[in-house]
Image (cartoon, rainbow, N blue to C red):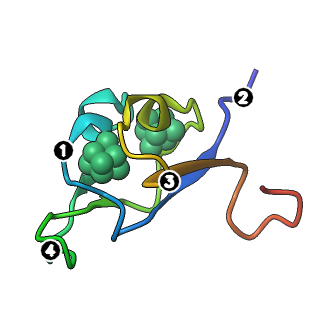
């Protein structure tokens, strides 16, 4: 059975840069950005590949709306 694929979207201004999602990600596809947001936190970045859409980063995140997980590929019409 093929592994699920997905991607994440990070809301830079909601992210507090706590790093919980980075620790939770088994695929090591999240890291800190080099520029801080308006609150002075370094938000998380998705590497652009490797996401398994398991949702672990979403469940680890204490900030509502900071990170969302999507299944499929970003350019697939059925991806949500
Ligand atoms: S959904 Fe899973 S694999 Fe994808 S970025 Fe989040 S923790 Fe990593
Ligand atoms: S867990 Fe949430 S608030 Fe913390 S770094 Fe990740 S996206 Fe940002």
Residue at the spot of label 2: 2
Residue at mark 4 to residue at mark 2: CA–CA distance = 37 Å
The image shows residue 38, relative to residue 17, as above or below, that is: below
Q: Which residue is mark 4?
A: 36
Q: CA distance from mark 2 to mark 3?
A: 29 Å
On the picture, is 12 further left or further right than 19? right
Residue designated by label 3: 65
Alpha carbon of mark 4 to alpha carbon of mark 3: how far?
Answer: 18 Å
Query: On the image, numbered disc 1 is attached to which residue?
Result: 18
Q: Is mark 3 within 8 Å of ligand 2?
A: no
**In the image, residue 31 above or below residue 54:** below
Q: CA distance from mark 4 to mark 1?
A: 13 Å
Which comes sooner in the sequence, label 4 or label 3?
4
Residue 25 location, x and y as percent?
36, 33
The outermost residue toward the top is 1
Q: Position of residue 10 (x, y in %)?
A: 43, 61
- Mark 2 or 3, nearer chain start: 2
Q: Of marks 1 and 3, which one's residue comes earlier in the chain?
A: 1
Question: Does dot 4 land on a helix, a strand or a loop?
Answer: loop
């Amino acid at each position: 059975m093929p592994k699920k694929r997905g991607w994440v979207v990070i809301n830079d201004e909601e992210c507090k840069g706590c790093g919980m999602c980075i620790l939770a990600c088994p695929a090591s596809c999240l890291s800190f950005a080099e520029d801080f947001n308006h609150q002075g936190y370094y938000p998380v970045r998705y590497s652009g590949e490797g996401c398994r859409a398991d949702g672990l980063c979403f469940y680890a995140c204490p900030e509502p709306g900071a990170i969302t997980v999507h299944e499929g590929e970003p350019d697939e019409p059925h991806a949500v």
